[in-house]
Amino acid sequence: MANVTVIGAQWGDEGKGKIIDWLSNRADMVVRFQGGNNAGHTIVVGDKTYKLSLLPSGVVQGKRSIIGNGVVVDVWSLLDEIERVGGAGLKVTPDILVLAENAELVLPLHRELDALREEAASQKLGTTKRGIGPAYEDKVGRRAIRAIDLKDIAGLPAKIERLLAHHNVLRKGFGAAEADAGALLESLKEIAPKIVPFIGSSWRELDAARRAGKRVLFEGAQAVLLDIDHGTYPFVTSSNTVAGQAAAGAGISPRQIGTVLGIVKSYTTRVGEGPFPTELKDATGEKLGERGREFGTVTGRKRRCGWFASVLVRQTIIAGGVDGITLTKLDVLDGFPEIKLCVGYELDGKMLDYLPADANEQARLKPIYETMEGWSDSTHGARSWAQLPANAIKYVRRVEELIGAPVALLSTSPDRDDTIMVIDPFVDR
Ligand code: GDP
Ligand code: IMO
Ligand code: MG
């Protein structure tokens, strides 16, 4: 039985949530394996819209869902989210949701440090200010507080002391007040009984699922160009977003990640700072943003827009370990007389067919475009290949050729059902 791992193959917000929700119908479990509540995954089912940040998208279809050990978890935000989706009719109880005992917590002091740094920096990163970077730093620095620690209140003061010894030096440097150990202890004590019922073991759950022949869907957040190693460093997030992270971030064999589906938008967007060679700061960029409703789910920030860059996706497919893609938001390109694809870059007179690792070079890249004729008919809501205009099919085929991977699924509106399956990613091949 094949598993499927879904990752973002651009700079995020490609429509992962929609596709994971659609695929979760065919899965038994859904597992998040990295990131935190910097993610914003939107799922539209008829007249209902769900915006998920920490909850795996499987909860919408009532599937057993795991927040794996690779995720950094703001437990206050998690409870708010559970309450919010509860109001929309989704019951998220410990029968459905498991929080890995060895996941690290995002604390208020992480959010504060994230914001202090962004405010002080001359070159901002444009983070979501959710404390994600500082929380991962503490994880790697071996001073984090983990979910399991909420089961041992007596052990918390010593852990808090160790953590604050580090943070108070940093806070002093920013002219901020020292963190209050007593207040942090109290708030952890208060939240512990609400979180403890969800705590479990990701690796054991997944081992049992494997033995029982269950199908598991691994849900990536962010995307390969935001990966801490493979992205546009330093304008990246603080986790690995590539498919291989599903193994480390959930506690499974790398052989269990199954087919890797990269989610790719039919054009390109980016929220936050950093190089974006095909960015359009003109009427065409505005039109893409308006038609695609490109506003961030988490921060409400306007997303920067530009043409599709096959040169980037070809690279993220290789570095991210992608077998096939889902091309989303094809409908947003309806009505553009011509559509451009960036097939390479020019750097100081030389042609490149990849994104160089150097940030200064990335900032100097000039896109090389190929132009295709657009289509005037609507693809919005198309549910079969036969409903697509000939030029839209040509575009999809050209994308496949340029990126070197097949289109397994195609998405033509925010709604769950407006999805075309070309290849079933759950079928082992
Ligand atoms: P994620 O972070 O990758 O899950 O993506 P987001 O949910 O942050 O952003 C994608 C946005 O595009 C959401 O508002 C979706 O409802 C919407 N969306 C997804 N697929 C399509 C599509 O095929 N067409 C259109 N028009 N919108 C889509
Ligand atoms: P989903 O899962 C798009 C971006 C931020 C910023 C950088 C670092 O919805 O695709 P961080 O708060 O992670 O330290 O910010 O990463 N970023 C995202 N951009 N989609 C996301 O998630 C993102 N998560 C983080 O805007 O540029
Ligand atoms: Mg998003």
Image: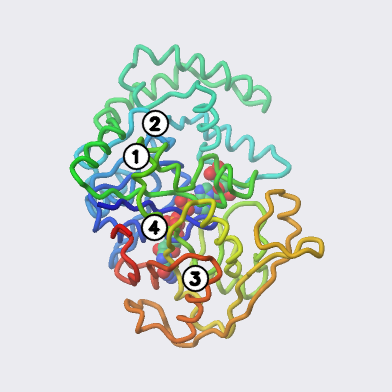
The three-letter code of the residue at mark 3 reads Glu
Which badge, 1 or 4, is on the more N-terminal residue?
4
Q: Is residue 171 found left or right of 397 in the rendered image?
A: right
Q: Residue furthest right?
A: 348
Dot 4: what SS? Answer: strand
Q: Residue furthest front?
A: 429
Q: Counting other residues with Cα less than 10 Å from the Cα at mark 2, is it few (<14), some (14-19), or many (20 or more)?
A: many
Q: Which mark is residue 42?
A: 4
Find out whether the residues at labels 1 and 2 contact each other: C-beta distance under 8 Å: yes
Q: Nearer the viewer, mark 4 or mark 3?
A: 3
What's the distance in space between the residues labelled 1 and 3, CA to CA?
33 Å
Tag 1 residue: 67
Which badge, 2 or 3, is on the more N-terminal residue?
2
Viewer-nearest residue: 96 or 217: 217
Expressed as whole percent of the image width and height from the top left, the position of residue 11 reads 55, 55
Q: Counting other residues with Cα less than 10 Å from the Cα at mark 1, is it few (<14), some (14-19), or many (20 or more)?
A: many
Q: Nearer the viewer, mark 2 or mark 3?
A: 3
Confirm or reject: label 2 Cβ below 8 Å from ligand 2.
no
Is residue 342 among what the camera can see?
A: yes
Q: Counting other residues with Cα less than 10 Å from the Cα at mark 3, is it few (<14), some (14-19), or many (20 or more)?
A: some
The three-letter code of the residue at mark 1 reads Ile
Q: Where ligand 1 lies, by image quadrant? A: bottom left
Tag 2 residue: 103
Dot 3: what SS? Answer: helix
Which badge, 4 or 3, is on the more N-terminal residue?
4
Residue at the spot 57% in from the left edge and 57% down from the top edge: 315
Where is the C terminus found, in terms of image quarters? bottom left
Dot 1: what SS? Answer: strand
Find out whether the residues at labels 2 and 4 contact each other: C-beta distance under 8 Å: no
What's the distance in space between the residues labelled 1 and 2, CA to CA?
8 Å
The three-letter code of the residue at mark 2 reads Ala
What's the distance in space between the residues labelled 4 and 3, CA to CA?
26 Å
